[in-house]
Amino acid sequence: MTGERASQSNNSGPRSPGKEGAVPGPAVRRLSLYLRELEGLYKRGDETISSKQLGEALGYTDSQVRKDLAYFGQFGHPGIGYHVDGLIARLRCILGTDRTWNVLLVGAGNLGNALLSYRGFNKKGFQIVAVFDDDPQKIGQRLGLTPELEVLPLSQLERIVSEKDIQMGIIAVPANDAQSIVDRLIAVGIKGVLNFAPASLNVPPNIPVDSVDLTVHLEQLAFRVFTNQIASEK
Amino acid sequence: MTGERASQSNNSGPRSPGKEGAVPGPAVRRLSLYLRELEGLYKRGDETISSKQLGEALGYTDSQVRKDLAYFGQFGHPGIGYHVDGLIARLRCILGTDRTWNVLLVGAGNLGNALLSYRGFNKKGFQIVAVFDDDPQKIGQRLGLTPELEVLPLSQLERIVSEKDIQMGIIAVPANDAQSIVDRLIAVGIKGVLNFAPASLNVPPNIPVDSVDLTVHLEQLAFRVFTNQIASEK
DNA sequence: GCTTGTGAAACGTTTCACAGCA
DNA sequence: TGCTGTGAAACGTTTCACAAGC
């Protein structure tokens, strides 16, 4: 059943995994970090980089870097390393950021506002093209950067999603509202969700959800700081 | 070399790992999610819960839940499950959120402001007790919730950290400033850092750093949405 | 009956080590 | 020499399976 694909040397099509099959989750996360680092190197004018250098910059081993990249093809040159610009293009293609993604935001509170004003999203090809909130105080407000967005009521969700061809949604509402919001997003055809509500969402298995809980991150940190303290008291 | 500790049945001291030794990183992350879920159950009046129920609520197996908890002791009762309130207390103690942590914030931009206004931190025992920014426009502004905080210049860092007994720092500055900020934080004795700047930070190995890059999360999502599309086209 | 805690097996990820190429 | 790509070994995590307890 595992489809096979002739290995296509260096000129393989976009995203070509060396083999059909699962890429480890952690590897995909690292690809984003490689890309971020490479974009910095590109700005500084570097033309090539070795797996060793790239790994050291991020705290990974050289073989880790090579294995991660090898899941998707053969991008390097023995004795040389990787061409920075070429690898950037490949990674963007692999991650899907060589195109623009239209994103909606639900929740125009503090966090929602901060997300609307964040320039980093646009730079990476993510455009927040609609904001929803059911608070009557917020509906009609214009928020965010240069082309400001009007806060719309959720009743407009279906219309706007198809009108603006929106594929992903960001949830920045209180925990209690998150499940009903995600249900509605999926009902109108949203294909992936980034959830900032401190709640665990129940969704069909084909809908990727990535949850960022700010307090969970602080707790992880507290645990590790605390562990260090105990260790150093020994 | 592996210290041994008589297994202390149910009344073991705080945080007692069943055995001295490493707890898997992913397990610690899940503990935070268990705690979040348990706090919800407690509000709804539930008194006991089984590993099966808790796992199902979060998308994990029952044995995963039991193994994670077993790293720290024996908290359950065969045939019954776990007492919700008791397990909450244990998890808080393990994660270090049974005390208050004083936290500082560097960067009073959009994201910094959103973090200052977020009530979830206080509920979990994290108090942002100082805000720093070197932008002259921002210094002196009063931001955040009820007891507003005055934005201070970084020159005050050392004094405030010792005065207010601050252990952790949150970085919400542009990528280019992040490394110099983290260096200064560590120099004044900060023990852990939550970094929102899209940059990889170089720190000594005994200083835990947790990085949250919002665009990395969207990229992960884009990758998975894109993968699903390709799969469904097959 | 149902549920925990845990050794052992299964699975997944990372690191090693080296052939092959520039 | 320096570097990639990759099979094999090492390591870590999750799941299984079951004895023991309510």
Image (spheres, coloured by chain):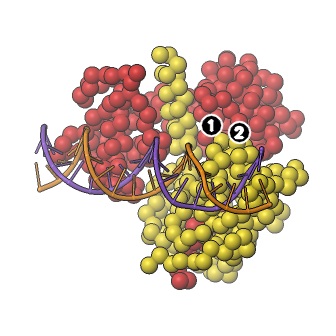
Chain colours: A yellow, B red, C orange, D purple
Q: Taking B199 as reference, is B2 left or right? A: left
Label pair 1/2, CB-CB below 8 angstroms: yes
Left or right of B73 in this view: A171: right
Give the amino acid type for the residue marked by disc 1 in the picture. Val
Give the residue at mark 2.
B201
Which corner quadrant of the image does residue A104 belong to?
A: bottom right
Residue B66 drawn above or below residue B231 = above
The relative height of residue B90 versus residue B51 in the rendered view (above or below) is above
- Residue B45 placed where, x, y %? 30, 46
Q: Secondary structure at mark 2?
A: loop
Chain letter of the residue carrying label 2: B
- State whether residue A217 is above or below residue B140: below
- At a point 65% along the width and 52% down the height, the residue shown is A65
Which of pointers 1 and 2 lies earlier in the amino acid sequence? Answer: 2
Residue B55 visible in this rendered orientation of the protein = yes
Quarter of the image for the N terminus of chain B: give it: top left
Question: In this view of the protein, can residue B46 be seen by the observer?
Answer: no
| Residue displayed at 80% across by 58% down | A84
Kindly identify which residue carries mark 1. Answer: B209
Q: What crowding class fits label 1: few (fewer than 14 Cα within 10 Å), some (14-19), or many (20 or more)?
A: many
Q: Relative to A157, does residue A182 appear above or below in the rendering?
A: above
Distance Cα–Cα, label 1 vs label 2? 8 Å
Residue at 33% x, 43% y is: B67
